[in-house]
Image (cartoon, rainbow, N blue to C red):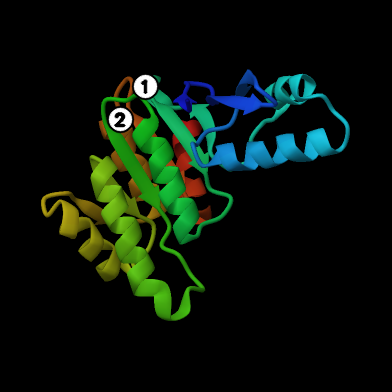
């Protein structure tokens, strides 16, 4: 019974015949497995399940890791600029998909250190992004052909722009409206986020 809330997630746990309703202030369905592991560890260390479930409410996201922020013009920003890898990018796009919003934008730093998997990973993330996003902005040209190939395998009309960090900020500043959601993924995407947040 996983539910995506504005402030995080909630889910039900059945333990020793009793059902507990858990809630945590972190974004992403993928976090449930991490939270279940934390509950198991807490119970093994001697906490009651009731206390462990209650303690989940104190968990907050790590800095720059799927952190929900107030954006410009009444929009929502998701700051996921700490790091980037294929699985984290897919998980972040799942979060974006679950967010309530009119238009959804993706600012993405292409990934590095993937070796022979670079092209296939970028294609996979591009395809996932095309399922969710209204527009996509890349912070550099690395593996852009593979990424765009993935995007266009799902939506051949979706525009992918490769722009400087300042150009991305300016473009978003002109199109973001109330209730839109923007996901910033990867370290290079922090620059346009900061530019927008200070405008």
Taking the spot 31% from the left edge, 51% from the top edge, the residue there is: 128
* Residue occupied by mark 2: 176
- The spot of residue 116 in percent (x, y) is 42, 81
Left or right of 24 in this view: 136: left
Which residue is outermost to the front? 17
Residue drawn at the location 33% of the way across and 34% of the way down: 173
Q: Which residue is mark 1?
A: 73
- Where residue 69 appears, as percent x and y from the top left, is 51, 28
Answer left or right for 150 relative to 78.
Answer: left
**Is the residue marked by circle 1 packed among few (<14), some (14-19), or many (20+) residues within 10 Å?**
few
| Residue located farthest toward the right when viewing the structure as drawn | 46
Asked whether the viewer can see residue 72, the reply is yes
Question: Judging from the image, what secondary structure is the residue with disc 2 in?
Answer: loop
**Which residue is located at x 39 percent, y 44 percent?**
93
**72, above or below 160, in the image:** above
Which is more N-terminal, label 2 or label 1? 1
In x, y percent, where is residue 146? 28, 69
Q: Is residue 148 left or right of residue 14?
A: left
Q: Is residue 104 left or right of residue 54?
A: left
**Where is residue 41, by image quadrant?**
top right
Tag 1 and tag 2, C-beta contact below 8 Å = yes
């Amino acid at each position: 019974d996983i539910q995506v809330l504005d402030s995080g997630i909630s889910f039900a746990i059945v333990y020793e015949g009793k059902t507990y309703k858990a809630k945590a202030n972190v974004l992403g369905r993928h976090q449930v497995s991490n939270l279940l592991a934390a509950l198991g560890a807490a119970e093994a260390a001697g906490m009651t399940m009731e206390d462990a479930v209650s303690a989940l409410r104190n968990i907050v996201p790590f800095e720059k890791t799927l952190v929900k922020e107030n954006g410009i013009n009444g929009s929502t920003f998701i700051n996921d600029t700490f790091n980037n890898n294929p699985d984290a990018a897919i998980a972040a796009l799942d979060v974006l998909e679950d967010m309530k919003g009119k238009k959804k934008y993706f600012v993405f730093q292409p990934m590095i250190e993937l070796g022979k998997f670079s092209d296939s990973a970028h294609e996979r993330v591009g395809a996932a992004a095309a399922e969710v996003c209204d527009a996509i902005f890349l912070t550099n040209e690395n593996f852009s052909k593979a990424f765009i190939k993935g995007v266009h395998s799902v939506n051949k009309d979706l525009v992918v722009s490769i722009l400087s960090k300042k150009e991305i900020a300016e473009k978003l500043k002109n199109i973001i409206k109330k209730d839109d959601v923007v996901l910033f993924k990867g370290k290079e995407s922090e620059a346009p986020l900061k530019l927008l947040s200070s405008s």
